Image (tube, rainbow, N blue to C red):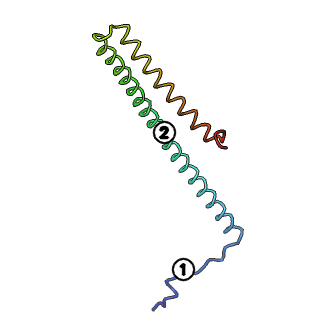
Amino acid sequence: MHGQDDSIDQPQDEPIGDVLTRLVESGKSYAQAEINRQKIRASEIGLEFCIISALIAVAAFLTLASMVALIIGIIIALTPVMGALGATSVVVGGVLVFAFLLLLLARSRFRRLSGEDRP
């Protein structure tokens, strides 16, 4: 009959240098595997950012195209009332005023952020 101690592997007499060498090699293998995993992860994240950037670019293009269509539609709608040149002038003037107001708003926010607007 075998006792419980027979089923447990007894530690082998192995030189400490061999154990340390195996430990270092195991650590190197683990580190290389982790580096490879992180490279793959970074590559996947980079690909996702490319896709996100493309989607944002398409959305911005479609938004710009719809704004142009809206402006042209307003010009067409105003043409019977004030003529083609008058409608174009009113719409372009209105868009330029709106753009100027947006720039003023951006400038005031920048000044507040940079501390120029503080007493």
Viewer-side label of 1, 2:
2
Labels 1 and 2: the sequence-earlier one: 1
For residue 97, above or below residue 114 = above
Q: Which mark is residue 76?
A: none
Q: Which mark is residue 49?
A: 2
Q: Please name the residue shown 39% across and 17% down the image.
A: 91
Q: Position of residue 101 (x, y in %)?
A: 50, 28
Q: Position of residue 43 (x, y in %)?
A: 51, 42
Could you say whether the residue bearing mark 2 is in a helix, strand or loop?
A: helix
Q: Please name the residue shown 32% across and 10% down the image.
A: 82
Give the quarter of the figure containing the C terminus.
top right
Of the residues shown, which amino acid type is indicated by label 1? Asp
For residue 66, above or below residue 41 = above
Of the residues shown, which amino acid type is indicated by label 2? Phe
Classify mark 2: residues with Cα within 10 Å, few (<14), some (14-19) or many (20+): few
Could you say whether the residue bearing mark 1 is in a helix, strand or loop?
A: loop
Q: Which mark is residue 9?
A: 1
Q: Please name the residue shown 53% across and 50% down the image.
A: 37
